[in-house]
Image: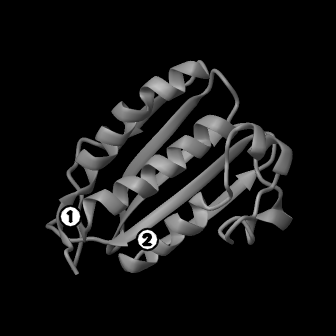
Amino acid sequence: KDKKVLNLTALIVNVADTMQIKAKRYNSRIVPEGIETDYYVKGREDKLRQVFINLVDNAIKYGEPGETIRLIAEAKKDKVCVSVVNRGQGIENKDLENIFEPFFRTDKELSRELGSTGLGLSISRKIVKEHGGNIEADSTPGEETVFMVSFPGIGSEVNV
């Protein structure tokens, strides 16, 4: 209910702009990519904004300071996908399946220091599912972590 057609590209650009200030504190920057194309999804803007702010916030906090955080929008088959990519310590394979569980934290001490409750990813997953989407993570520890969110797309580029 209350879902409207949203320009997901504009939302991503806005989140990147909003989070730039926090990224600067870590000497990082956020670069949106794939934003030449407007991608549309049906959803609640406030909820989707919450998901992307959370993912970018995690990328800033848990990423390597001084690195670029990439926000990549793209169409894949009938879906609109947004990936949040950062470099840093990463997430061990054994933890990947649990990171969306409430209160799960890979590094409890670091999470406490950073003010994390361990709820962000489980809330994000719930919101994404409510939008008919999917969220997954992939990580190579010490290298790159990717959170990919996909939604059913609408519009000429993406089949409904």
- Residue 63: x, y in percent? 67, 36
As helix, strand or loop, the secondary structure at mark 1 comes to loop
Tell me the quadrant of the picture where the N terminus can be found. Answer: bottom left
Q: Nearer the viewer, residue 82 or 42?
A: 42
Where is mark 1, residue-wise? 157
Circle 2 residues within 10 Å: few <14, some 14–19, many ≥20? many
Please indicate whether residue 13 sits to the left or right of residue 99 in the image.
Answer: left
Q: Of the residues tagged 1 and 2, which is closer to the observer?
A: 2
Q: Is residue 94 visible?
A: yes
Using the image, determine if residue 75 lies above or below residue 53: below
> Which three-letter amino acid code belongs to the residue tagged 1?
Glu
For residue 157, what is the image quadrant? bottom left
Tell me if label 1 and label 2 are in contact, CB under 8 Å.
no
- Residue 91: x, y in percent? 77, 53
Q: CA distance from mark 1 to mark 2?
A: 24 Å
Using the image, determine if residue 160 lies above or below residue 135: below
Structure colour scheme: one colour
Circle 1 residues within 10 Å: few <14, some 14–19, many ≥20? some
> Which three-letter amino acid code belongs to the residue tagged 2?
Ile
Please indicate whether residue 67 sits to the left or right of residue 112 in the image.
Answer: left
At 50% from the left edge and 64% from the top edge, which residue is drawn?
Answer: 124
Please indicate whether residue 156 sits to the left or right of residue 142 in the image.
Answer: left
Q: Is residue 29 visible?
A: no
Using the image, determine if residue 9 lies above or below residue 152: above
Where is mark 2, residue-wise? 127
